[in-house]
Amino acid sequence: MGFSVSGLVSGINTDSMISQLMQLERIPYKNLETKKKDLGDSQTFFRTLNTKMNTLKTVASDLTLGSNFNLSSVKSSDETAAKVSGTSTASTGNYNVVINNLAKSHVVKSFGFTNDGKGQQLAVGSKVTVDGQEIELKGSSNFEILENLKNDINKNSKNVSASVVETKTGEKTLVLTSTRTGTDHAINSTNGPKLSGFKAAGLWNDLSDPSHQVQAAENAKISVNGLDIESASNEIKGVIEGVTITALKEGSSSMVTVAKDADKVVEQVKKFIDAFNEVRKMIRDNTGKEKPLQGDSTLRSLDMELTDWVTGLVGPDGNTSLLAEFGIEMDKGKKGSEMDGQLVLDEKVFKEKLEQYPDKLTALFNYDGSKGGNKGIAQTISDKVQIWTSSANGILNSRIKGYDSEISFVTTAMENMEVRLQNKEKLLKKQFTAMELAMGQLQGQSNWLNTQLASLNASNK
């Protein structure tokens, strides 16, 4: 810590004076701070814009797929009989689905056991095998053995589920259920759970004995427009392309309708319009009068290109169309200063045109230019946006990297200036301290002279 005699002799608050002088000295530094912040804000803007442009490219790429203009929805007339779900590209049509039989799991049971030592007894220490896993019967009573066996089966097998059921007062039974439906998954069938050792352990005589059968394994049997279908599961796929039928009630029927869904197409187009409008709004909000990027040539160029991408004629020569023909217009109903370059969708017009001219609407977005003329809007945007957002040499990424260089330059200048300012402050403190010391010495000499003069005058009297 340096020695300081602030105003001790002079009566001047030199610390305050140095502080004010340093504030003046720091004005260029503050200007650099402001410049660095402005550069950082501009870089953040271009990063965000780059992200929004990539989003626009993604949704535009989706619209280059013709399937996104031929979307469908699926509906069951009786969801207590059959539930249905489907992809957006499911085959359209009406399908009469009749549920003749539901798929069922194989269910078997053991003897009934009491806990009083009478009747059937379980062989403690004997072993059963479930899906290759050996399980030992443990416990001090029949009920405890059954409970332990149930827990061990459920722990070791995913193909069979065990439970203990009280079938009569004071009598319990082990119930085993195949976890999958259908005849192929019956217990001890080719694809079903494998059990052995249960007879020797005293659980049953023979599994084929009808007294041990609770429910036979069965396949689902349905018909679709008269075509008989058999399935191991109640969830049936592939009968109607792109549709999954879940059978719920035997002896019932439902009309399944797969129809074109204009609302889904509208949803896809809205995503595109929203992404376009977000990019445009971001540009206009930051380049208007007295805005931080007012007059930026890169943004002016992009703003003009956005308009060109969505307003020109599209399609092969002699069969062109405009976006406005299908209910999508720029600045619809706006005049003068209200015009902000936003796309507006008239859903009613769009749906009507989709129904009347589906191929032409599809081509408006995804025409590839192979027969001359301008490419479709989605194709054009997918191609053009790449020029702006490419991580290698995209225009926006080049701006972002340029800001890195500028920010680095300003940061270095600030660091160097900070060193100079610190040295300047040290020098000022040293100079003012020297001034105070010099004034102190002069004041001391003055006091001595005054004392001498006073003594001389006294001696002459």
Image (tube, rainbow, N blue to C red):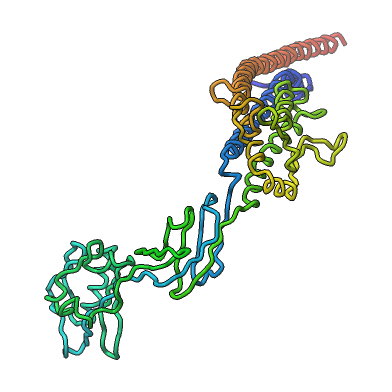
The answer to whether residue 112 is above or below residue 293 is below
Q: Residue at x 51, y 65 (%)?
A: 96
Location of residue 126 in the rendering, given as x and y in whole percent from the top left corner:
12, 73
The answer to whether residue 363 is above or below residue 348 is above
| Quadrant the N terminus occupies | top right
Left or right: 49 in relation to 342: left
Count of marks overlaid on the render: 0
Q: Quadrant of residue 48?
A: top right
In this view, the residue in front, 387 or 104, is 104
Location of residue 195 in the rendering, given as x and y in whole percent from the top left corner:
19, 68
| Quadrant the C terminus occupies | top right
In this view, the residue in front, 452 or 241, is 241
Q: Residue at x 34, y 68 (%)?
A: 219
Q: Residue at x 87, y 37 (%)?
A: 335
Q: Quadrant of residue 164?
A: bottom left
On the question of residue 1 being in view, the answer is: no
Left or right: 224 in relation to 381: left
Location of residue 373 in the rendering, given as x and y in whole percent from the top left corner:
66, 26
Left or right: 408 in relation to 353: left
Location of residue 44 in the rendering, given as x and y in whole percent from the top left corner:
64, 30
